[in-house]
Image (cartoon, helix red, strand yellow):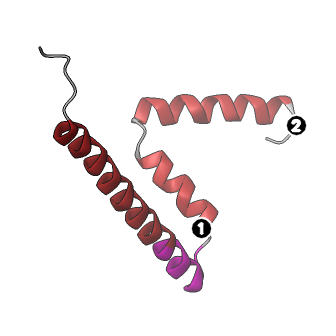
Amino acid sequence: MADQVTAAELRNFVERYEQLEAEKKEISDLQKETMAEAKGRGYDTKALRKLIADRKKTPDQLAEEEAILDLYRSALGMA
């Protein structure tokens, strides 16, 4: 029966997930250390995070976002 749960298989899934959680935490800690180092060297971490987010976007996505921001700034007299 394909739906039968075996203890060994279940344990395997749980242990794999736990390992991934540990790896995710380790990566998160390394990211925090990297930002702390950048901040210590005088970089603006808020700007760095924005740059990192922007690098994940396509040129079309960035252009659309900038156009909307320009429109909103203009409407608020910020242009």
Secondary structure of the residue carrying tag 2 is loop
Q: Left or right of 22: which side holds 76?
A: right
Residue in the picture at 88% in, 37% down:
77
Give residue 19's position: percent from left, percent from top: 30, 56
Q: Nearer the viewer, residue 36 or 23?
A: 23
For the point 25% across and 38% down, the residue is: 10
State left or right for residue 59 relative to residue 5.
Answer: right
Q: Residue furthest right?
A: 77
Q: Amino acid at mark 1?
A: Thr
Q: Quadrant of residue 26?
A: bottom left
Q: Are marks 1 and 2 in contact (CB under 8 Å)?
A: no
The percent coordinates of residue 74 (x first, y second) are 80, 33
Of callouts 1 and 2, which one flags the residue occurring earlier in the amino acid sequence? Answer: 1
| Position in image of residue 17 (x %, y %) | 32, 47
What is the total number of numbered labels drawn onto the structure image? Answer: 2
Q: Which residue is mark 1?
A: 45
- Vertical placement of residue 47 versus 8, above or below: below
